[in-house]
Amino acid sequence: MRIAILGAMVEEIEPILTGLDPALKPDSPLDDIIASSKHINVQTIAANRYFTVKYKGHDVVVAYSKIGKVYAALSASVLIEHFKADVLLFSGVAGAINENLHIGDLVVATKLCQHDLDITAFGHPYGYVPEGKVYVESSEYLRQLAQNVAKEKGIKLHEGIIATGDQFIADPNRKEWIKKTFHADALEMEGAAVAVVCDAYDVPFFILRSISDAADMDASFDFDEFLKSSSKVSADFIISMLDKIIQ
Ligand code: ADE
C-alpha cells in the first residue's frame, strides 16, 4: 500500500520524517534529515520536494505543501497522480473555534469546508460553487481507525468540522462568523483543499490537527510558540495511525 502524509509547513513534517526513520535524531531540522538519512529519497516535482521512505515494507511519501489552499491542492494532486497514493493523511496545527479545544488537543475533521469561498452575490450559500459541495466528508473508516488508536494510547481525540481559508485568523469577529456560518470547531488553511482533491479522485483521506492557538487576538503569538510542540503531537499520532493502517 502507498501511503501519503502531507503537512503544510516544514515544522509539521520534520517530526513525521524523524518518526519514520529510527536512525534519525528526534528534533532534527529538515536539512539534517536529508543529509543524514540513508533511507529517505528526495524528489522535486512541480517545484516542491517529496520524501519517499520504505517503512515496515510499505511505501510512504511525505511532503509539506507550503501554506494555503492552492499549494495544498497541488501537493495532494501530485501525491495521487504521480505517487499513486492509496490513502492520504494530513498532519498539522489549527486554530480552535470550539471552546472545548485547547492548545495541544487533537481534532480530526469529520467534514471540511472553505470559509473564504464566496459567490453569495449569485444567491449561493457561503462555501458553495456549482457542481461542488459546501462540506466534503473524510473517510469514516480512517476516523474509526483513529478512534481505536486513541483508545489504545489513552488519548482524547476530538472530532469536528474544520473550516479552511487562505487567511490566518487572529480576529474574534471573523472567528465568530466562521463558527456561526459553518458550525466549525477548528480552522486552518489547507484541509478543505486536500479534501476536495481526494474526494474528486476517490482517495480516502484523514485530516488531523493539533491546536496551536485560538484564532483570537493572541493567535500569531501563540502560533509561534506552539507550532513545534503541537506539530509533534499531531505527527506522533499520525505515525501510530500509519502503524495501524499497515498492520
Ligand atoms: N492554523 C493554525 N492556527 C491558525 C489560524 N489562527 N488561522 C489559520 N490557520 C491556522
Image (cartoon, rainbow, N blue to C red):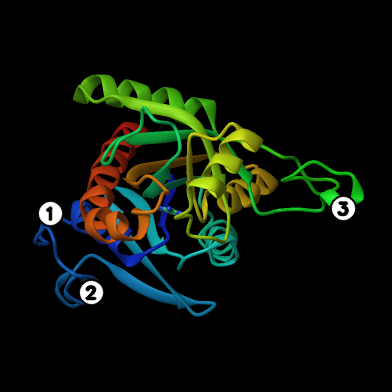
In this rendered view, identify the residue nearer to me: 16 or 162: 162
Mark 2 — residue? 34
**Mark 3 is on which residue type?**
Ala
Cα separation between marks 2 and 3: 48 Å
Q: Is mark 3 within 8 Å of ligand 1?
A: no
Q: Residues within 10 Å of mark 1 (few under 14, many from 20)?
A: few
Mark 3 — residue? 121
Q: Residue at x 38, y 43 (%)?
A: 209
Q: Earlier in the sequence, mark 1 or mark 2?
A: 1
Viewer-nearest of discs 1 and 3: 3
Mark 1 — residue? 22
Q: Are marks 2 and 3 in contact (CB under 8 Å)?
A: no
Q: Earlier in the sequence, mark 2 or mark 3?
A: 2
In this rendered view, identify the residue nearer to me: 133 or 199: 133
Query: Could you say whether the residue bearing mark 3 is in a helix, strand or loop?
Result: helix
Cα separation between marks 1 and 2: 14 Å
Kindly tell me whether residue 16 is visible in this rendering.
Answer: no
Query: Could you say whether the residue bearing mark 1 is in a helix, strand or loop?
Result: loop
Q: Earlier in the sequence, mark 1 or mark 3?
A: 1
Task: Note whether 171 is above or below 207 in the view shown.
Answer: below
Which quadrant of the structure image shows residue 31? bottom left
Q: Classify residue 119 as left or right of residue 12.
A: right
Instruction: Single out the residue that lies furthest toward the right.
Output: 122
Coordinates of residue 153 in the picture (x, y in percent): 20, 25
Query: Could you say whether the residue bearing mark 2 is in a helix, strand or loop?
Result: helix
**Mark 1 is on which residue type?**
Pro
Q: Residue at x 47, y 65 (%)?
A: 67
Coordinates of residue 197 in the picture (x, y in percent): 63, 52
**Mark 2 is on which residue type?**
Ile
Cα separation between marks 1 and 3: 53 Å
The quadrant the N terminus occupies is top left
Coordinates of residue 73 in the picture (x, y in percent): 59, 60
